[in-house]
Image: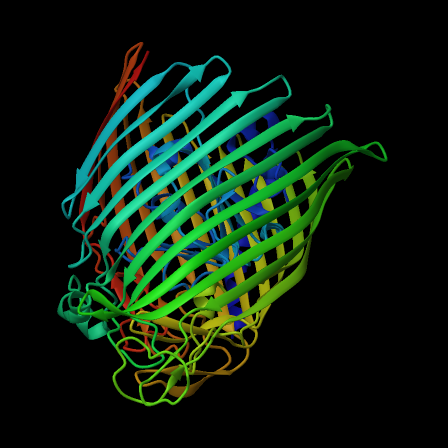
């Protein structure tokens, strides 16, 4: 049945592509303006139209105009194959799912590589957070899906990379302000310009909200800057500073289906009892040197360093000999280095580009845990030094070996090392060993043992792609490759059976990707892209248990992801634009495995054929825009439909499908030196009551994070050029 549904979904897409392809009659130079220049797939600037990959680029106008500019979901919602779940709490950040990868993440992003101007926003183990991205100063966001993402390391799903805009030609200062529902407001200042050989841009903002749900207030201070200086005709240096501070962000936790029906805005009592939430600060700086060795050779060097502090309260107050506490304190130092050399030449009189590169990333965590005594940290329960380091080398090449053919290939070797040094080794008072007595333990005879240890994973990940230029405006491509995904330090933190120590029994998952696709310019106004893919994964990493905010993970058996992605971007006359992105994805467990549910954990068998939790089968986004330059007016209608999602491996409960709409509109006024903008938007116009995100396999049945009802945002800005 699964194969039949996949074919039924594919047939109408293939027919549409054939019709569009058969009607092509326009010159390429009139159409290529619709295909953006991207760098993520090949690490060199190139038109997305000519690449054998599924890659979407979101431009500055789409990211910044008539939007709040705080959450990555505001932009990524328009990328096919990509789902961003909004938990309506800044304490947990948003979750990015690419082709079904990353769905298991209880907070933040896993399985997808995050980059900001080439600097990782993911740690070496694969954990990342979208809150680091500053959208107000973003020039573009690129989303790479498929096997070529394996050339970036231990991430199976894809790569999301944000690029900061350059400063304008003239010094410009832009204050801005917005406000909206739930006592939400944001104020900021952006300034930039060109001073001799120095180009600079910086943005600082302050954001506050009471949140849609109870106990979900948040504060977010952010600063992002980029300084690029031309050292010579052949050399440039770019310096980047990024800072984020989110103090005392509250977490209302998930709700059961019954609680959603009773009061979807409520926070559960444990959220108040244990003061669940998080405080986060992250400061990182990086430098990039680009040097043209010759006309055919370019060298790029990158270095970055940073510190991250994360204090969090979860709904756990237990104080037994082996529990690690409901208050977590993390102090992380991280750094990384990278180098790549790109050489352009000819092979058999045909253009060849080849890139060699290597990178190293390291993160060292000082991690402590304390008893959560009704929101107050008391006795020490965990004290360890954890580290993760990733080292990799890669080569990738592109060769236009014939007039209508080009080939791309790459190979990467990645090794990831984990190490934990446990400083919390102690005994209960009734134990006769020479160990010190554990703080706060007054009875019993148990021991909290030394859980130190280390392990490492490595893999070779080859990829290859082929492009056939059927006509100047119609390309057909295919690719194949292998990727792997290591467990993160968080996923190694707890064992499924509840015994103490890191979960060293886990293994990486590995995937084989197959993809065919086409990219077509239909006239001068429309670019249509379609991809059909299948991904076979072994040792899928799944949630073994999820109780009281503490997740344990394990390896399951084989899984499969089969899907179709379609997008159509059109620019019509009289100021009209349309955009459509549609995805069909069937993500299933192909082998039965044992899991557990409930509190206490009860074992059961997950049958083959069950859907992977949190992955919708259908996802459709549409945007209709209109501009009237004479009045400086623009408006738009955004529509989104998402299919239902299972919330657990057993598929016993689902978050329902939903349809939501948003309307936006605004004005712009310009003089020689001034630019003013005003906008208003209403999200969830029809007041749909839907679930924005799910907590996979929650042991208490609190799977659901309700999304906001109808809400509004109003904003203004004023730019002055000196």
Quadrant assignment, res 510:
bottom right
Quadrant assignment, res 455:
bottom right
Task: Answer above or below: position of 476 versus 171.
Answer: below
Query: Picture coordinates of residue 401 (x, y %)?
Result: 79, 39
Query: Picture coordinates of residue 648 (x, y %)?
Result: 38, 74
Task: Answer above or below: position of 583 versus 405.
Answer: below
Residue farthest toward the right in the current orientation of the protein: 348
Figure coloring: rainbow
Residue farthest toward the top in the current orientation of the protein: 672
Query: Picture coordinates of residue 668 (x, y %)?
Result: 26, 22
- Quadrant of the drawing holding the C terminus: top left
In the rendered structure, the answer to whether residue 389 lies left or right of residue 611 reads right
Query: Picture coordinates of residue 405 (x, y %)?
Result: 74, 41
Q: Nearer the viewer, residue 682 or 256?
A: 256
* Residue 93 in view, yes or no: no
Q: Residue at x 38, y 43 (%)?
A: 75
Q: Nearer the viewer, residue 332 or 401?
A: 332
Q: Residue at x 45, y 73 (%)?
A: 553
Task: Answer above or below: position of 652 versus 285.
Answer: below
Q: Nearer the viewer, residue 480 or 29?
A: 480
* Residue 131 in view, yes or no: yes
Q: Residue at x 66, y 32 (%)?
A: 299
In the rendered structure, the answer to whether residue 176 lies left or right of residue 366 reads left
In the rendered structure, the answer to whether residue 654 lies left or right of residue 113 reads left
Q: Nearer the viewer, residue 686 or 613?
A: 613
In the rendered structure, the answer to whether residue 690 lies left or right of residue 262 reads right
């Amino acid at each position: 049945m699964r194969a039949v549904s996949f074919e039924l979904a594919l047939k109408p897409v293939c027919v549409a592509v054939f019709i569009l392809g058969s009607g092509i009659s326009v010159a390429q130079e009139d159409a290529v303006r619709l295909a953006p220049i991207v760098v993520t797939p090949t690490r060199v600037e190139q038109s997305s139209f000519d690449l054998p990959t599924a890659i979407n680029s979101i431009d500055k106008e789409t990211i910044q105009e008539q939007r709040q500019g705080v959450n990555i979901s505001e932009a990524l919602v328009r990328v096919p194959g990509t789902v961003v779940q909004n938990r309506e709490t800044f304490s947990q950040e948003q979750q990015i799912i690419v082709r079904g990868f990353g769905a298991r993440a209880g907070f933040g992003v896993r399985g997808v590589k995050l980059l900001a101007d080439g600097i990782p926003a993911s740690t070496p183990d694969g954990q990342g957070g979208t809150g680091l991205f500053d959208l107000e100063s973003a020039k573009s966001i690129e989303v790479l899906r498929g096997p070529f993402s394996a050339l970036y390391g231990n991430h199976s799903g894809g790569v999301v990379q944000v690029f900061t805009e350059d400063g304008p030609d003239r010094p410009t200062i832009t204050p801005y302000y917005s406000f909206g529902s739930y006592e939400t407001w944001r104020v900021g200042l952006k300034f930039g310009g060109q001073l001799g050989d120095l180009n600079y841009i910086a943005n600082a903002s302050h954001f506050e909200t009471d949140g849609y749900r109870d106990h979900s207030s948040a504060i977010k201070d952010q600063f992002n800057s980029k300084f690029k200086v031309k050292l010579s005709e052949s050399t440039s240096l770019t310096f980047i500073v990024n800072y984020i501070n989110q103090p005392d962000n509250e977490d209302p936790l998930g709700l059961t289906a019954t609680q959603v029906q009773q009061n979807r805005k409520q926070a559960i009592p444990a959220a108040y009892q244990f003061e669940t939430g998080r405080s986060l600060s992250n400061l990182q700086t990086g430098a990039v040197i680009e040097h043209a060795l010759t006309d055919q050779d370019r060298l790029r060097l990158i270095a970055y360093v940073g510190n991250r502090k994360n204090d969090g309260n979860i709904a756990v107050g237990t104080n037994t000999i082996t529990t690690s506490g409901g208050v977590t304190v993390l102090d992380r130092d991280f750094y990384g280095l990278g180098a790549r050399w790109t050489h352009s030449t000819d092979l058999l009189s045909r253009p060849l580009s080849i890139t060699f590169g290597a990178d190293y990333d390291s993160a060292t965590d000082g991690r402590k845990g304390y008893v959560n005594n009704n929101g107050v940290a008391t006795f020490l329960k965990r004290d360890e030094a954890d580290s993760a380091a990733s080292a990799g080398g890669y080569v990738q090449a592109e060769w236009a070996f014939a007039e209508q053919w080009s080939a791309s290939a790459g190979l990467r070797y990645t090794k990831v090392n984990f190490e934990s040094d446990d400083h919390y080794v102690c005994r209960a008072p009734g134990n006769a060993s020479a160990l010190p007595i554990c703080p706060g333990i007054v009875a019993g005879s148990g021991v909290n043992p030394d859980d130190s240890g280390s392990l490492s994973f490595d893999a070779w990940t080859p990829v290859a792609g082929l492009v056939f230029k059927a006509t100047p405006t119609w390309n057909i491509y295919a690719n194949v490759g292998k990727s792997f995904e290591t467990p993160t330090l968080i996923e190694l933190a707890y064992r499924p059976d509840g015994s103490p120590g890191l979960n060293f029994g886990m293994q990486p998952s590995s995937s084989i990707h197959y993809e065919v696709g086409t990219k077509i310019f239909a006239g001068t106004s429309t670019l249509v892209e379609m991809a059909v893919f299948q991904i076979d994964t072994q040792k899928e990493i799944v949630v073994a248990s999820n109780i009281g905010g503490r997740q344990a993970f394990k390896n399951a058996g084989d899984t499969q992801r089969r899907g179709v992605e379609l997008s159509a971007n059109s620019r019509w006359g009289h100021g009209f634009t349309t955009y459509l992105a549609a995805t069909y994805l069937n993500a299933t467990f192909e082998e039965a495995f044992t899991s557990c549910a409930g509190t206490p954990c009860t074992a059961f068998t997950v049958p083959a054929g069950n859907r992977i939790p949190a992955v919708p089968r259908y996802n459709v986004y549409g945007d209709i825009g209109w501009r009237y330059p004479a009045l400086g007016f623009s408006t738009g209608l955004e529509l989104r439909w998402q299919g239902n999602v299972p919330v657990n491996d057993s598929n016993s409960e689902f978050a329902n499908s939903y349809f939501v709409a948003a309307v936006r509109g605004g004005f712009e006024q310009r003089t020689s030196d001034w630019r003013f903008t005003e906008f208003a938007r209403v999200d969830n116009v029809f007041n749909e009551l839907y679930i924005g995100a799910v907590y996979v396999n929650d042991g208490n049945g609190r799977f659901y994070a309700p999304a906001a009802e109808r809400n509004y945002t109003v904003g203004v800005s004023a730019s002055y050029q000196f």
